[in-house]
Image: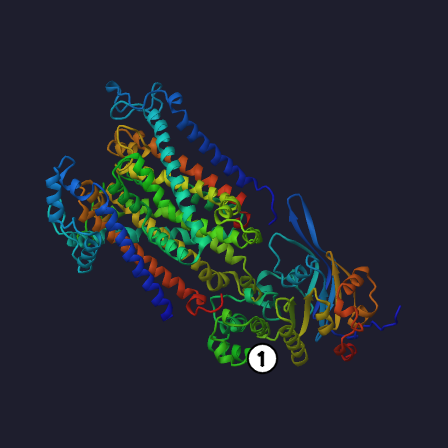
Amino acid sequence: MTDVSDARPHRAGETPTLAIRDLVVEFPKRHESVRVVDRISLDVWPCEIVGIIGESGSGKTVTALSALRMLPKRSRIFGSIALGGRPLLDLDDRSMRQLRGDRLAFIPQDAMRALNPTLRVGMQVGEPLTLHKHTPWRRALDKATDLLGSVGIREPQTRMRQYPHEFSGGMQQRAMIAMGLALEPELLIADEPTTALDVTVQAQVLRLLKAIRDDKNTAILFITHDLGVVAELCDWVYVMHRGRIVEDGSIRRIFTAPRDDYTRMLLAATPSLSHAANVPPSLAAEVHT
Amino acid sequence: MTAGLNWPRYRLVFLGGALVTLVLLAAIFANWVAPYSPLDLDVVQMLQGPSHDHWLGTDELGRDVLSRAIFAARVSMEVAFVAVSVGLVGGTLVGLVAAYFGGWADLVLMRAMEVLFSFPAILLAVVLMASLGTNVLNAMIAIGIVFIPGFSRLARASTQAVLRQSYVEAARTIGMSDARIIFREILPNIVSTLIVEAAVAFAYAVLLESALSFLGLGAQPPDPSWGNMLNTGRGFLAQAPWLSLVPGMAMFLCVLGFNLLGDGLRDIFDPHLRD
Amino acid sequence: MIKLLVTRISAFALTLVAASLILFVTITVLPGSAAKAALGIDATAQAIARFNSQHGLDRPLAVQYGEWLGRVLHGDFGTSFQNGVSVGPELLKRLPVTLELAILAFLLANVIAIPLGAYAALRHQKGGDRSVTFLATILGAVPNFWLATLLVLILTLTFRWLPPSGFTPLRVNPILNLKQMVMPTLSLGLVSSALLIRIMRAAMIEVLSSDYIRTAYAKGAGERLVLSRHAFRNAFIPYLNVAAVEFGFLFGSVVVIEDIFLLPGIGSFVLVGIINRDYPVLLGASLVITVFVLIVNLIVDLVAGLLDPRQVKGGRA
């Protein structure tokens, strides 16, 4: 076995941005109930990009939605989820609502569907400000323009008066990210935000997310089925399979010395990684920061 | 979420099926089921309320209301059956041709259908009846024409969906004739959708026939139809409310039956439309 | 926006011309129509020929239609075969009655359908949803002319809450007018609400399950705001299109309902035309009904277009 250091940068005295402990999610179905997430625990530390990788149906999206407490009403959820020390599962609906879009934001897979087709983009991007800070609409819209500019949308003044269908796929995803950033959240939860995009656009969006982390110290929980993306972006990765976390580790360790059979299978099934010297060039610099 | 038997839903389909079966049996076996002839006058027993002899009472000429309602089911079913057939065959033909040949045929045919569709159904039926003349056969034709645009839209959309499938392309490349493709490849694949729609159209045909007869434009007295029974009953609303209640209830149960059946069939055949 | 307006209005004009042609042909040209109708079945061949030349019915169809259309555009609907009264002014007199009924009934249908349908969608697959769906199924199976009869039986004959049928102009006695409109409005509106409830429910269920509603919740919007700002407007676009079709159905049904309640509107004029076999009357009255249905369809189409920016700018869907 290769000797690879696998220590997570230690953060004495710090509270994790997101701490999930023994999370169980069940969906009742006729007579029995199906356990979609099975006793998982994970941490996201401030300023860290953490990946959850797994195939579809492995429970990663459900994990993300439980952190937002946006699962279907009939689901049952056990364990604890803390955002910056606040126990989310104990909050009443109103307090939880105040955190959503403010302290933690969600970036979905399909930006085109996630944007309301009948409302102008600027209004949708600025909306979190009016919801949480009682910002008057005019100032919220000004801020939305700045936000759109900051995520790399050119001519934001024009763009914000347009409707989602006038945006390209990449711009729609940038707009979603801008919306998520409106109130500088502690945590961005991104659920396969680049899956629907072209490879070149995908790379731009990943670079944007990394820049956000670097500039604003936002922690990011990044959910994907794409090992290449994980390698490109994440500091730490959890491998999820059938509702459980089978292993976690630094990118370097997971890629060079996977411990779980499922992880090995994932690696073997990703051609570009299995013969590209295991680690993309950008990774070498990234791992020990 | 997942597929599986949805019992409350299926109960309603069975209820619909039962109502429809009841009406159909009454219509087919009217001669045997009805206690009296629908035309037998009995001057001694005019406007009698429900009794042992006449379960649902008698009308202004002493005729047995139950028997008339049963025979009226026959008129309704005949009219609905022919009208829906006219609409189904005509509409399918138009829709198929429009979708299969596309281009100008499509444009012209579907524009024409749109114009027909823009008339309120009842008005179109009433005007057609006025021009064709008031009898049951013309009611069948008039209502059938009203249905053509609806069926043609559905047939066109389903045909277009089938045409996108690769097996039609395959049939074309091996040089199958248009007629063969239409009858062998397309028609069998759109027929279930059209049949489901026909069940719903049946309910609507019953409504339209009743409305026409109610206005005196459909079945002519003394032949009973729910519509003309209700129209007559209206004149005796205060003295003999059963004359209005019985045919109305019959219409209601019949329409309800076909609606429930149609909705249910749609759920079964078109699972993607289920909500 | 202007492009949308132009295409819709030209389509409207085209449909209108085609519809008027169909009405004209159906009512005047089909065998055994005008002459026999006016003169009786046993009219002599000479009498029929005289009648036809008198009314210009022996000329080519295209000429007749063109002339008729030209006169109609100037407000001249001809004179009644029956009593020689000019049809145009009579239509104008009757129009307000029908419009009042149709507007009241359509309002009622929507006032019932929008909240109930939205409520059912919010309670999807729960008790509230089932009750509303059940109600819609029942209402949808009631023939409106039977409901009219039932209402007379209950409200007028049994409880004597409402005056018997008849019509008093709104100007003359507004209270009595409205009282007389209650039953016709209920018969049309309740039945029409059935389909609209189901459409509103289906549209709302579809919208509520969409990703952008999840986005709105993820932003921290509360349920009320999500519904009013993000859901309603979007559900309204498909709803409006069906509502327009339902308005057509409702507006056609005035033929039956006005007859029952003795309302002197366009609908009962259609029947007068049929019973007297008076084709200028029938033609004029059915044309007016068709025109109004088409106008409402046009308006709804434009409003739905305004609500849906994808249609206005015609960009990618």
Going 19% across and 44% down the picture, which residue do you hit? C273
Q: Is residue C92 above or below residue B210?
A: below
Within 10 Å of disc 1 (Cα), the crowding (few <14, some 14-19, many 20+) is some
Q: In the picture, residue B111 is in which quadrant? A: bottom left
Relative to A103, is C251 on the left or the right?
left
**Foreground: C99 or A263?**
A263
Q: Height in image: C43 above or below C230?
A: above
Q: Is residue B1 visible?
A: yes
Reply above or below: A276 against C106: below
The residue lying at 76 percent from left, 70 percent from top is A273
Which residue is more in the foreground, C224 or C98?
C98
Q: Please state, as top left, top right, bottom left or bottom right, where the N terminus of chain C lies in the image.
A: bottom left
- The chain under label 1 reads A
Q: Position of residue C243 (x, y in %)?
A: 38, 54
In-image side of C151 versus C176 (left or right): right
Residue B204 image point, x, y percent: 38, 41
Left or right: C84, with A255 as reference point? left
Q: How far across and down, in percent of the image, does residue B1 sit?
A: 60, 50
Please give the name of the residue rendered at 52% of the width and 74% of the height, measured from the top-left corner.
A126
Asked whether residue C117 appears in the rendered view, the answer is no
As drawn, the residue found furthest toward the front would be B175
Q: Which residue is mark 1?
A: A152
Q: Which amino acid type is marked by label 1? A: Gly
Asked which quadrant contains residue A19, the reply is: bottom right
- State left or right for residue B65 relative to residue B96: left
What's the image's color scheme?
rainbow
Q: How many marks?
A: 1
Residue C228 lies, with reference to residue C273, above or below; the image says below
